[in-house]
Image (spheres, rainbow, N blue to C red):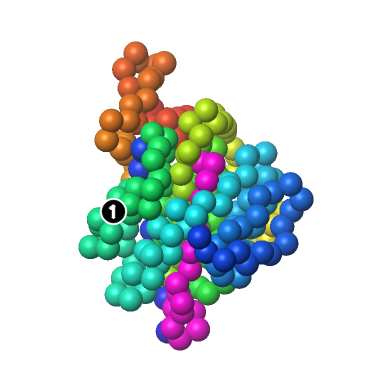
Amino acid sequence: MNRVTMAVTVLFLSACANQVGNAEGLPEWKGGKQEEAKFYNLLNQFRSNLKLKPLKSDDRLYLAASKHSDWMMGYHLLTHSGPNIGGTSYTRVIAEGVDTEGVIGEIIAMGNSTARATFKQWLFSPPHLMAMISPEYDHVGVARSDCEYGNDCYWTTDFAQLDTTGESDREFTVEEVTRAAEMVLGPLGDQRTDISLEGTENGGAGMQSAPGATTPSEDNGGYQSPWQRLKKRFWNTP
């Protein structure tokens, strides 16, 4: 059995370390599994190639991600919702002690056991790619479940903006993103054309405001949702 699927949601708002070598100057992984550490390093090297700040590993986000990956594996169900720990990515992260008025996001996938293959799954999906290169995030937790049939594994990556004074305005071209990806994965060949920043203009990433969170808009004197701000940043659409 080899099923490959994934999903994404973004919301406003201690394991034993298993170190894997990473690029100089990037923070070290604090999670518990080798492939998780590899994904964390791939993600931060990718972001570094785009001149984005690296994501710091956060124990609370790791626990939220780990529990959700294990829950999905137990039920063989790929979903952001469910009865575990409150039922949403927001409540799961908050339940682990994360307290922020910044953005919180989550991407999930199933079907691959390795960090490299899962990274490519998300790289070739515009809303997942958008989450990985968002300049607003500064902390992350990524967790993979145990696997059945070799490759039947579930992945969860939870992102958070814990430093609300961080970077927020960046624009990228497909060529820039493709070059950054090839610097960590090697030549992509025909798969270069699978990288896109289009296709989520109508809200495919599921971004919404957390309770009480508002964002001033310089354009209309009112407020813009986080999703509206990301659309404007990446695709110059209202």
Q: The residue tagged with tag 1: helix, strand or loop?
A: loop
Classify 10 Å Cα crowding around label 1: few (below 14), some (14-19), many (20 and above). some
Frontmost residue, 63 versus 39: 63
x, y percentage for residue 127?
44, 49
The residue at 31%/62% (across/down) is 79
Q: Quadrant of residue 212?
A: top left
Frontmost residue, 91 versus 3: 91
**Magenta region, main secondary structure:** loop
x, y percentage for residue 117?
57, 68
- Is 87 contained in the magenta span? no
The residue at 39%/40% (across/down) is 99
The residue segment tinted magenta is 137-153
Query: Is residue 4 shown above or below 96?
Result: below
- Could you tell me which quadrant the N terminus lies in? bottom left
Query: Is residue 217 shown above or below 151?
Result: above
Query: Is residue 211 shown above or below 198?
Result: above
Frontmost residue, 160 versus 76: 160
Q: Quadrant of residue 186?
A: bottom right
Would you say residue 64 is visible in this rendering?
A: yes
The residue at 54%/56% (across/down) is 123
- Is 144 contained in the magenta span? yes
Q: Is residue 87 left or right of residue 8?
A: left
Q: Is residue 75 left or right of residue 154?
A: left
- Could you tell me which quadrant the C terminus lies in? top left
Given the current orientation, which residue lies at the most extreme right position? Answer: 24
x, y percentage for residue 146?
46, 77
Amino acid residing under circle 1: Thr
Would you say residue 110 is visible in this rendering?
A: no
Query: Is residue 201 shown above or below 218?
Result: below
Q: Which residue is mark 1?
A: 88
The residue at 35%/43% (across/down) is 11
Q: Is residue 233 left or right of residue 106?
A: right
